[in-house]
Structure formats: C-alpha cells, structure tokens
Image (cartoon, rainbow, N blue to C red):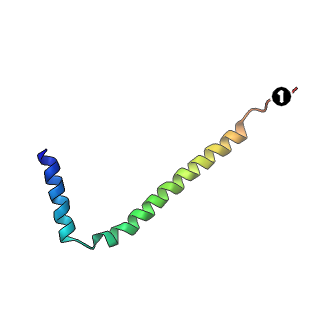
Amino acid sequence: MFNIIAAIQFFALNVIRFPNSWKDTLPAMLIGMLGIFIVIGVIILFTYALNKATASKKDDE
C-alpha cells in the first residue's frame, strides 16, 4: 500500500515540477506508437502473403 502512495506522490511532484514536459515527450511517444502499428501491419501482410503463396490448391471434380 505504501508503494502505491509513494508512486502517486512521486508522479504528482514530477507533474508539478515539470508541467510542460508532456510537450516534449508526446511527439516521441506518438512516433513510437505509429512505428509499432506499422511493424504489426507489415507482419500481418507478410503472413497473409505467405499463406496465399504456400496454400495447397484443392481439386474441384
């Protein structure tokens, strides 16, 4: 319980001490999140392409 209170107090003191720090860190976080989504999208597309390329063809008779 003490750890939670200490963490909240530490966060609150840093927000009070550096109120404009989010202006510097938010763009970096957005670029990082965009990079994560792009990498996930590339992995999904690559997996889809491999599935299409290596799928066995069914004989319809």
Above or below residue 53? Residue 40 is below
Q: Quadrant of the C terminus?
A: top right
Residue at 79% across, 30% down: 58
**Residue 42: x, y in percent?**
58, 52
Q: Secondary structure at mark 1?
A: loop
Left/right placement of residue 35 relative to residue 7 reads right
Left/right placement of residue 56 relative to residue 5 reads right
Left/right placement of residue 37 relative to residue 45 reads left
Which residue is most to the right?
61
The number of discs equals 1
Which residue is most to the top?
61
Which residue is most to the left?
2
**Residue 30: x, y in percent?**
43, 64
User: Crowdedness of circle 1 by 10 Å Cα count: few (<14), some, many (20+)?
Assistant: few
Left/right placement of residue 57 relative to residue 16 reads right
Q: Quadrant of the N terminus?
A: top left
Above or below residue 27? Residue 39 is above
**Residue 27: x, y in percent?**
40, 69
Residue at 16% across, 59% down: 10
Quadrant of the rendered image containing residue 50: top right
Residue at 72% across, 41% down: 53
Q: Amino acid at mark 1?
A: Asp
Q: Which residue is mark 1?
A: 59
**Residue 29: x, y in percent?**
39, 63
